[in-house]
C-alpha cells in the first residue's frame, strides 16, 4: 500500500523593513553600540513597523547617532508634554518600498516608572549595551534576556499605583501582555546568571524576591514585595520627591483624560500626537471627479494619524461636512429640489437660460439665495483656512480636501458669482466683486504642498457615470490649470493607476514634505 508523501512547504524568510535595517547597519558601521532593550518578545512586529522600535544607544556617540539617523532618512518629532521624557527622543522613519511608517523611541537613558511620569532613571545603560546579543531572525542587537527580564519586573513594580501597593487593587489581575512577555523571557534566561546579575545590581533581598517571581510567576502581591525590596535602590534613582512626583503624574493624567472628554463633548481633538519641530505643513489634494481624491485624502490622513497630529479639513462646498451657517441653506435647497424634482436652487455660477434674458423682479429671490449661499461658503472657507494656518504654526500636519482659488470661476472651488460681474443691477455686480476679493484673500494662505491627482476624461467618466463627459473634461482641465505661487510645491500623481500605487506615490511625496 503506497503512502502519499507531502513535501513540507519551505518556511518563509522574515525580512524586516529596509528603513529599519538601514538604521541598524548604519549604527553598526559607525561603531555605535545599540540594542533593542525591551519588548523583544515582539521584535518582529517592531521591525515591520507595526509597533514601536525601542533602541538604547551609547549617549557618548550622540553626534554619530544623529548622522546615522539623517542618512537613514529618519525625522525627529516632538511629543506633547504629557508624553515627553528627558533622555528619550522620538523619530519617524519611512519605508519607501512599502509605504510604512516606523516609530523609533531613541533612548539615551533608561527612564521608566509610573504611567504619565516615568520618574526613575536606572544607571544600567553601559551594562545593557555590554551584554547585548545579536538576534539572528532580524539582525538587530537586543538586550540579554536576564537583564531584560529583571528590568521588565522592575518596570511592573514601579508602575504600581498607591492603591495597588496598599493592596486595594485587584490583586489577582495582571495585564495579559505582561504575562506573555514574562513567560517568553523566563523560558530564555539562565537562572544562575539571572540571580548573579540581580544580586550584583540590587542586592540579595531583592534578588531573592526576583528569583521567587521567576519560579512561581508574577502577581500583584509579589510585585508589591519587589517594590519594597528595591526601595533602597530606587530612592537613589528617583527624579522627583514623592509629593512632586504625585503632583506631576496627576496633572499629566488629568490633561490626558480631560482631552478625551473634550473630544467626546465637542467633537474637536486636542493635540495628543507628535508635532513637527521643523514647523507644520498644509497639504492640499486636488482632483477631478473619479480621481479618488476623497479616498486618497482619507487614506493619507489615517496613515499619518498613527503617530502624527493631523488636522483634516474639507474646503469644498459639495458632499463634505458643512458649517452651522450653511446647514439651513442646504436644508432649503434639498426641500426645494424635492418639490421641483431637480435642484433649482443652484450653487453654481453658471447662468441659466432664464437669467440670460433681461432681469426682472422675479429674479430677486433666487439672486438673494445665491448671495446667501456664497456668503456661507466664504465664511466656512475663511474659518477653515484660519484653522489650517493655526495648525501649521503649531507644528501640525493639515490635510485639505480641495483648496479655494480665485483663478477659474465657477469650477475647481472658485468663486460662484463671477457671472454677475457685468450684470445690469449694481448690487449684484458689487456681490460678485466682494466674493472675488474674499477668494483672493483666501489664496494668500498658500499651502506648502499641492498634490494633483490626474485622470483622463474617459477614466473619470467610467468612475463617475452621473456626469456628462464634456463636464468631466472641463473639470479635469481645471485641475491642470490652477496655479500656485513659488512657495508652494506642486506634485503630480497619475490617478489612473491602481489605488495601491497611487497611495504609495502619494505617501512618498507627503513624507518629503514633513
Image (cartoon, grey):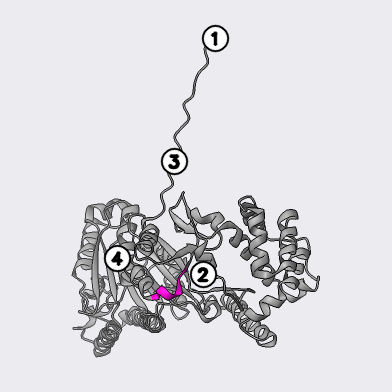
Q: Which residues are magenta?
A: 57-62
Crowd rating for badge 2 (residues with CA inside 10 Å; few <14, some 14–19, many 20+): some
Label 4 vs label 1: CA separation? 63 Å
Residue highlighted by disc 1? 1
Q: Which mark is residue 509?
A: 4
Q: Is residue 219 visible?
A: yes
Q: Is residue 342 visible?
A: no
Q: Which mark is residue 33?
A: none
- For marks 4 and 1, the one nearer the N-term is 1
Q: Which mark is residue 126?
A: 2
Q: Main secondary structure of the magenta part?
A: helix
Q: Nearer the viewer, mark 4 or mark 1?
A: 1
Residue highlighted by disc 3? 12
Q: In which quadrant of the rendered view does residue 369 lie?
A: bottom left
Quadrant (top left/top right/bottom left/bottom right) for the C terminus: bottom left
- For marks 3 and 4, the one nearer the N-term is 3
Q: In which quadrant of the rendered view does residue 201 lie?
A: bottom right
- Percent x, y of residue 456: 22, 56
Extreme-top residue of the structure? 1
Q: Is residue 58 on the magenta stretch?
A: yes
- Badge 3 element: loop
Amino acid at each position: 500500500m503506497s503512502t502519499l508523501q507531502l513535501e513540507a512547504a519551505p518556511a518563509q524568510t522574515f525580512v524586516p523593513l529596509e528603513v529599519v535595517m538601514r538604521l541598524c547597519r548604519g549604527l553598526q558601521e559607525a561603531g555605535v553600540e545599540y540594542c533593542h532593550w525591551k519588548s523583544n518578545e515582539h521584535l518582529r512586529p517592531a521591525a515591520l513597523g507595526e509597533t514601536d522600535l525601542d533602541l538604547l544607544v551609547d549617549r557618548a556617540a550622540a553626534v554619530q547617532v544623529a548622522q546615522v539617523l539623517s542618512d537613514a532618512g529618519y525625522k525627529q518629532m516632538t511629543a506633547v508634554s504629557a508624553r515627553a521624557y528627558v533622555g528619550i527622543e522620538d523619530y519617524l522613519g519611512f519605508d519607501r518600498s512599502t509605504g510604512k511608517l516606523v516609530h523609533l523611541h531613541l533612548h539615551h537613558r533608561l527612564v521608566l516608572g509610573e504611567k504619565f511620569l516615568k520618574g526613575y532613571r536606572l544607571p544600567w545603560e553601559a551594562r545593557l549595551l555590554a551584554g547585548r546579543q545579536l538576534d539572528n531572525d532580524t539582525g538587530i542587537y537586543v538586550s540579554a534576556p536576564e537583564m531584560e527580564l529583571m528590568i521588565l519586573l522592575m518596570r511592573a513594580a514601579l508602575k504600581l499605583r498607591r492603591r495597588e501597593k496598599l493592596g486595594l487593587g485587584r490583586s489577582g489581575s495582571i495585564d495579559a501582555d505582561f504575562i506573555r512577555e514574562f513567560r517568553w523571557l523566563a523560558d530564555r534566561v539562565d537562572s544562575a546568571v539571572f540571580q548573579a546579575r540581580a544580586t550584583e545590581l540590587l542586592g540579595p533581598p531583592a534578588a531573592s524576591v526576583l528569583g521567587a517571581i521567576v519560579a512561581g510567576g508574577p502577581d500583584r502581591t509579589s510585585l508589591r514585595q519587589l517594590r519594597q525590596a528595591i526601595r533602597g535602590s530606587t530612592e537613589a534613582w528617583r527624579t522627583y520627591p514623592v509629593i512632586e512626583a504625585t503632583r506631576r503624574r496627576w496633572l499629566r493624567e488629568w490633561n490626558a483624560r480631560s482631552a478625551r472628554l473634550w473630544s467626546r463633548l465637542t467633537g474637536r481633538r486636542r493635540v495628543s500626537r507628535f508635532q513637527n519641530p521643523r514647523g507644520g505643513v498644509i497639504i492640499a489634494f486636488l482632483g477631478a471627479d473619479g480621481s479618488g481624491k476623497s479616498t486618497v485624502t482619507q487614506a493619507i490622513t489615517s496613515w499619518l494619524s498613527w503617530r502624527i497630529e493631523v488636522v483634516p479639513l474639507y474646503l469644498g462646498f459639495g458632499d463634505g461636512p458643512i458649517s452651522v451657517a450653511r446647514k439651513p441653506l442646504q436644508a432649503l435647497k434639498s426641500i426645494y429640489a424635492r418639490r421641483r424634482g431637480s435642484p433649482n436652487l443652484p450653487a453654481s455660477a453658471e447662468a441659466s437660460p432664464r437669467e440670460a434674458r433681461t432681469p426682472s423682479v422675479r429674479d430677486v429671490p433666487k439672486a438673494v439665495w445665491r448671495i446667501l449661499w456664497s456668503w456661507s461658503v466664504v465664511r466656512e472657507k475663511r474659518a477653515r483656512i484660519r484653522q489650517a494656518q493655526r495648525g501649521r504654526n503649531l507644528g501640525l500636519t493639515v490635510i485639505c480636501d480641495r483648496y479655494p482659488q480665485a483663478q477659474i470661476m465657477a469650477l475647481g472651488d472658485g468663486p460662484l458669482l463671477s457671472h454677475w460681474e457685468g450684470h445690469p443691477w449694481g448690487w449684484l455686480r458689487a456681490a460678485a466683486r466682494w466674493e472675488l476679493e474674499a477668494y483672493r484673500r483666501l489664496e494668500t494662505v498658500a499651502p506648502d504642498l499641492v498634490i494633483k491627482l490626474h485622470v483622463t476624461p474617459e477614466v473619470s467618466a467610467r468612475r463617475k457615470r452621473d456626469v456628462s463627459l464634456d463636464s468631466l473634461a472641463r473639470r479635469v482641465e481645471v485641475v491642470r490649470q490652477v496655479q500656485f505661487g513659488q512657495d508652494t510645491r506642486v506634485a503630480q500623481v497619475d490617478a489612473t493607476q491602481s489605488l495601491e500605487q497611487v497611495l504609495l506615490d502619494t505617501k512618498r511625496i507627503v513624507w518629503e514634505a514633513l
